[in-house]
Image: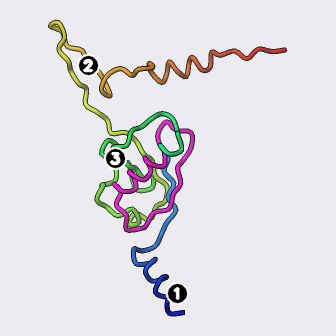
Amino acid sequence: MLLYNKQKKNQNAKGNRILISVTVLGSAGPIRFVAYEEDLVASVIDTALKCYAREGRLPLLGSDFNDFLLYCPMVGPEALSTWNAIGSLGARNFMLCRKPEEKKKEATNGRSSSTINGGARKGGSLKAWINKSFSLKVPSH
């Protein structure tokens, strides 16, 4: 009985666990996982990105948590500070978005061109992919 009580105390040493739901902007549905209330927002972003990649979701996001911001709709329109504890907000639903990048200017042949998000993607834009997906025709019998 004494051994059981020590194990139970060690499990609760880090604090209470909470179920978090993180919706990734542009993804089909939320990611749900358990975190401790004392976990930092940066740790929650990192865990969300790992779960997202493990599930094979699209669009591909990458794994650098510094490129993302976590928002809580109940708290306000500002992004959460990465050094705050996730449980201090009292909320369980969050939105994960990529940080907006400044327009990059490249000088080529005397003229400058601006690109957003680091340049063109390999497969084209998301809008083109959606238009192509909807234009597929299903043959009828």
The residue that appears at 46% across and 77% down in the rendered structure is 11
Query: Residue 4: which disc?
Result: 1
Residue kind at label 2, given as amino acid type? Ser
The residue that appears at 37% across and 64% down in the rendered structure is 39
The residue that appears at 37% across and 68% down in the rendered structure is 38
- Rendering quarter of residue 138: top right
Q: Which residues are magenta?
A: 24-52
- Foreground of the two, 100 or 78: 100
Q: Earlier in the sequence, mark 1 or mark 2?
A: 1
Q: Residues within 10 Å of mark 3 (few under 14, many from 20)?
A: many
Residue kind at label 3, given as amino acid type? Phe
Query: What element does badge 2 sit on?
Result: strand
Q: Residue furthest top?
A: 109
Side of 17 where 88 appears, left or right: left
Q: Residues within 10 Å of mark 1 (few under 14, many from 20)?
A: few
- Foreground of the two, 42 or 80: 42
Side of 63 where 140 appears, left or right: right
Query: Residue 114: which disc?
Result: 2
Is 60 in the magenta?
no
